[in-house]
Image: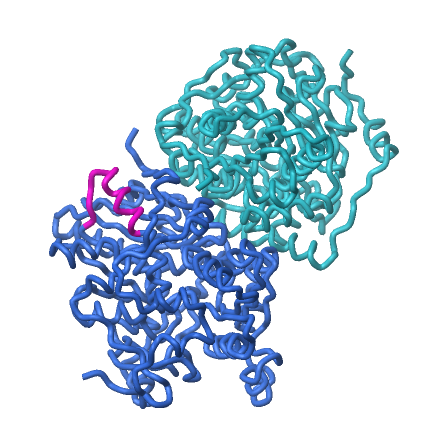
Chain colours: A cyan, B blue
Amino acid sequence: MKTRKFTLSEQDIPDKWYNIIADMPNKPLPPLHPGTKEPIGPDALAPLFPMALIQQEVTADKWVDIPDEVRNIYTLWRPTPLYRAYGLEKALDTPAKIYYKYEGVSPSGSHKPNTAVAQAYYNKQEGVKRITTETGAGQWGSALSFACNHFDMECEVYMVKISYEQKPYRKMMMNTWGAKVLASPTDTTEAGRKILAEHPDSPGSLGIAISEAIERAASDPDTKYSLGSVLNHVKLHQTVIGQEAIKQMEMAGDFPDIIIAPFGGGSNFAGLAFPFLRYKLEEGKEIRCVASEPSSCPKLTRGVFRYDFGDTVGMTPLLPMYTLGHNFVPAPIHAGGLRYHGAGVIVSQLLKDQLIEACAHDNLEVFDAGVLFARAEGIIPAPEASHGIATAIMEANKCKQEGVSKTILFNLCGHGHFDMKAYEDYFEGKLVRHEITQMDIQESLAELDTPEIA
Amino acid sequence: MKTRKFTLSEQDIPDKWYNIIADMPNKPLPPLHPGTKEPIGPDALAPLFPMALIQQEVTADKWVDIPDEVRNIYTLWRPTPLYRAYGLEKALDTPAKIYYKYEGVSPSGSHKPNTAVAQAYYNKQEGVKRITTETGAGQWGSALSFACNHFDMECEVYMVKISYEQKPYRKMMMNTWGAKVLASPTDTTEAGRKILAEHPDSPGSLGIAISEAIERAASDPDTKYSLGSVLNHVKLHQTVIGQEAIKQMEMAGDFPDIIIAPFGGGSNFAGLAFPFLRYKLEEGKEIRCVASEPSSCPKLTRGVFRYDFGDTVGMTPLLPMYTLGHNFVPAPIHAGGLRYHGAGVIVSQLLKDQLIEACAHDNLEVFDAGVLFARAEGIIPAPEASHGIATAIMEANKCKQEGVSKTILFNLCGHGHFDMKAYEDYFEGKLVRHEITQMDIQESLAELDTPEIA
């Protein structure tokens, strides 16, 4: 019997998170105050986040201890399996060896609980009673609902109204874990009321939902805010993925030449890639790390590196990032988790320094890849996850053309159980290509008056 | 860190299925021909099933080898995890130790692929090109679609029309694995056309769908039929669950006093309970095995033990079973997988011989249990699985009342990702109790003219 799945035991769950900043040749530039444009310190974040998370956001320590209580919850689904994709290799008739790490076994079905549990834990430690957040398609909202429920904290999720109406099952999942889900824009915040006054029928947007969640947290001392990607501490928490994968690749007697992960704000990519990238930064080991983004939201492949806001309305600190401009509105692709205008600070610096790569795939190519994978490997992937599959297929086909065998590892970050409507659209031929022109991007960037980076 | 999850490696997947018939003090009575009422031999099943499965249906061998190719596919999700339910124990404040085996990690989300893969394999070996089956809510249909796709065989699923319309996502899951899904009654079979002529708007039923799938298979030499529960070979395949659980309970340094599993046709229950029951049959070890059924379909707790048909229209052989009568129509509870009038032959004989027990729960009690579990343990269970949870809670509460600590193990047979509408109904107060009276049951049984058992 060929070994197809590499399984670790509970004792193999990492006890430290890996902070890549310690190993970066060029450290990320500091965040700037949205008004003064001067560098800000950790204190500026105190109204929104507990101190432990702010310390993790700025720490230079290479390793951060994972509290036992967090590891204890991780055991519910971690260590996650790593598979050799024999079925996919056969379907592609490629000499490449393909592996994938599967994060869809978590209770909410993606990698998101890795950070949700950690964030809920530190909030609980500091006496926070309630956490607010925003969610689009609902992956992040369900992960945080699950985590808050575990620690007996309230969770308020501002869910983009159009998703709230079109995706009732994700909402119901959050309710099952006891969370309160509001269709944003709501009349409970100033930001929401302002939008509703101007546009009573607004379908909402992630930008509006972020503003509502932040306003709610900033105006109540018992309430903090939580973000599911982009920030340094979120990336840090996700590094359990790659650390486990290193052990599993050792079990397989192999080491990846190419690491691939879908890219929204960067936490998924960071989670798998950073622990491997350490070998490149420390020892100069040859390894390519490829971030896979939608061609309809191509901040890494077609954006610019400059300071920009994390949200649409400009309430957050200015961050040095690859961005399409904070007013860029991506096409309504099904991979809702990747529809974000900017990239996290660490990943942006690494790309700038050419230590990682990026590529983009159209919607249709992504679903071709997802269905091919479901039939070859048996697991139905989330549309976000299918971006990584599309890149892996592209690299495996390249190996075939060149007649070389490389070892490819990608992050299968979630299952598609709540995305079957998207598959239906695909099978019924309702999906369309979402071309964006250089003009679209230039227009969005032309509006930016945020500081440039020399 | 308390060990919460007991993980086996690929090498621990059993290499044999356990056939409890070899150890039963009273063997099951033979099936009878539906017309002559005389005992039938294996040959009678040849138009519907491949010979290898028919041999497994009647074998007296205690152990049946699992082919390497089947074990190889099992590795995609097996061994499944076994958990200590610390969260649930705490929520119940019980002295009982509660464990659960989680089968929801399979690609289709339940225990069903354990047999679907085996059945598809043997069909493929014998040159079958196409397998037909019926499905209600879709758990079984998706498992067989997944399995047929793996072996490159066609799969035709007759899906009860009302489910086809109300549960498009399960249908889409089957399509993603390449299966053809038909809304039954169809105009492609005589059985279907007959129903449509009389009731053009028929919402369909499992009985009609079975008739269509059987007719299709019987009329085409390239096509066989497949059933997801009830039959002996299906129960046999599921015993991988209990065999793994025995090893995992050893890792936990424990052994169950009480084993609990949801009950529809019996394969779920058999899968977990039979390998443990062996210790009772061989060595007289004290162990209670409790089958958990819906009170709206109480064949084990309120049915009679006599010969009855496996389907509604009376095409199958007569089987010696606990039954409510093959015309009994259960209330439309959300646990669609448990809405079956009869119990498999082996389980029926074991119950008759008082070697196992049964209990029943109402719909509302089941959802109370499911939501309590989701919040205490983090996993959202399928409504079928919540029946086992309800029984486990009942037994744990009994322990508390009596001040004794017992070890309880139950089968969490699937996740509820495709059942969120049911949770919504529960939260919105739309679920109602489904009382059935002794009169309802007596009426259904009074219609039976099948042979009684002395």
Identify which residue, A204 or B36, lies in the foreground: B36
Quadrant for the N terminus of chain B in the image: top left
Say which residue appears at 33% left-offset and 85% top-offset.
B444
Identify which residue, B38 or B269, lies in the foreground: B38
Residue B35 is inside the magenta segment: no
**Magenta segment range?**
B242-256
- Residue A252's x, y, as percent? 48, 30
Quadrant for the C terminus of chain B in the image: bottom left
Q: Main secondary structure of the magenta part?
A: helix
Instruction: Name the quadrant containing residue B22.
Output: bottom left
Say which residue appears at 49% left-offset and 43% top-offset.
A108
| Horizontal relation, residue B46 to residue A386: left or right | left
Q: Is residue B362 visible?
A: no
- Residue A244's x, y, as percent? 46, 27
Identify which residue, A339 or A434, lies in the foreground: A434
Residue B27 vs A342, above or below: the answer is below
| Horizontal relation, residue A398 to residue B256: left or right | right
Q: Is residue A272 visible?
A: yes
Instruction: Name the quadrant containing residue A272.
Output: top right
Residue B50 vs A370, above or below: the answer is below
- Residue A253's x, y, as percent? 48, 26
| Horizontal relation, residue B230 to residue B139: left or right | left
Residue B254 is inside the magenta segment: yes
The number of discs equals 0
Say which residue appears at 46% left-offset and 35% top-offset.
A130
| Horizontal relation, residue B50 to residue A95: left or right | left
Say which residue appears at 28% left-offset and 56% top-offset.
B63
Residue B149 vs A52, above or below: the answer is below
